[in-house]
Image: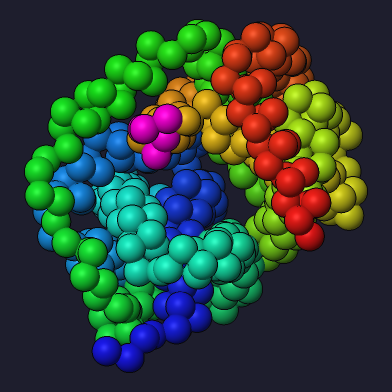
Amino acid sequence: MQKTSPWAFIPSLYFLEGLPYILINAVSVVLYTDLGLPADQITFWTGWLYLPWILKMFWSPLVDSRSTKRRWLLGAQGVLGLVCLGIFAALFCSGLHRGAASSSLFAWTLLGFWLGAFASATYDIAADGYYLLALSVQDQARFVGIRTIFYRLAMIAGSGLLVAAVGHGKTFFPLTIAWAGAFLGLGLLFLLGAWWHRRILPAPAADRPAAHAQGPVWADAFKTYFTQSNILYILLFILLYRIGDALLEKTVVPFLLRPQAEGALGLSLASYGLLKGTLGLSAVIAGNLAGGWLLSRYGFKRCIWPFALALILPNFFYAYMAWALPGPWVAGALITLEHFGNGLAMMAFSVFVMYISQGAYKTSHYAISTGIMALGMMGPSMLSGKLQMLWGYEKFFLFTALFSLVSLLIIPLIFKIKSIEETERAFRQHTLQLGDGD
């Protein structure tokens, strides 16, 4: 059978993996802010959308033991297409009846995002498994950067270009009609992707249902994860490292978009798409690249302090912006710096999770760690809107900035984790040997 080049499907596969994640966790907040819903309602209900990414570790054995990864991928893309078309229908009908902020519109669109979240989390599981089965070891190494780039490009397209396009569309159409057009395009894109991948995706012989259910294996994986030494320090770091980011993530959207009379910046939707979605996420990619290079050169233990500071400092940017209400140029520069710091900090977090995910169950341990991280993001993000409405933007952002300093108290504890030191020593030794070989 003729071999299909990975270039024919890896870019599109990972672009369509990144797109629903940013739509569900970020664009949904922009939509509801644009519809005029209160911040506490937005953050509470959209905070629940993290849940599928927390729980996906529990149903990944189902993906392994039922059908093939290829079929799961195609099915998830089809569901995401239908979900987007359902959200389009809800928005379009609301626009016809001029019910922009009706409770029924909120309920129907939230149901769509909820179903999409489960489909997207399932897509993540199937895509990671399919990547390992469909590509040779050499191609896996060659395309790991390509898949990351297209995943990030999807985030820029969703949170930046799409939102900016809706902002421009509002000058010609009613608000809900402009948003409906965006989701119509997204629905057709996912269905087109499902059609394309059905034609192009290879069907590797190894891609078949697992012979046995994975329940006992996962029981062992959980047991070995939660009984490893210094597990308390590991959990504290995973839950608290991004605590400031978790409080900010969803409240930043109404702060940027609400009118200045409410103590916000009053950016247009098009400006938001450019600053937060396009420039901001481009800065995240730059931070990822710089962070990866610095970590490979200097190691985790030397980088974690400056990277953690780069994650915390932008919290004070928002406290300043809530006080000074600067123009879009200053706001754009601070937002870009915030995202660059976030890119650096997330690389350190990824390396930390990689270092503690060792042994026979390292893939399962990695999934458990990322699920715990999502749990740490979910709780604070759900409460953030209530706190912001209670205190106002200035006090809320100042509280967030000061509270985020808790992260610095956790860092000395992780140096006591033996697996960090042992794994980094082995990693550094391997890197030096590769350098000598070159």
Rendered location of residue 310, percent (x, y): 80, 33
In the image, taking residue 351 as reference, residue 314 lies left or right, namely: right
Q: Nearer the viewer, residue 424 or 49?
A: 424
Q: Nearer the viewer, residue 334 or 217?
A: 217
Q: Quadrant of the C terminus?
A: bottom right
Main SS, magenta residues: loop
Residue found 57% across the figure and 20% down from its top: 419
Q: How many discs appear?
A: 0
Residue found 73% across the figure and 30% down from its top: 300
In the image, taking residue 303 as reference, residue 206 lies left or right, namely: left
Rendered location of residue 202, percent (x, y): 30, 78
Residue found 50% across the figure and 69% down from its top: 139
Q: Is residue 254 above or below residue 438?
A: above
Q: Give the colour scheme of this rendering.
A: rainbow
Q: Nearer the viewer, residue 304 or 159?
A: 304
Residue 148 part of the magenta segment: no
Rendered location of residue 356, percent (x, y): 52, 26
Q: Nearer the viewer, residue 409 or 433?
A: 433
Q: Which residues are magenta?
A: 359-363
Q: Quadrant of residue 119?
A: bottom left
Q: Is residue 365 above or below residue 75?
A: above
Q: Quadrant of the N terminus?
A: bottom left
Q: Is residue 139 above or below residue 399?
A: below
Rendered location of residue 132, percent (x, y): 38, 59
Res 106 seen here: yes
Res 113 seen here: no
Residue found 72% across the figure and 37% down from its top: 429
* Furthest residue in direction bottom, as rendered: 2
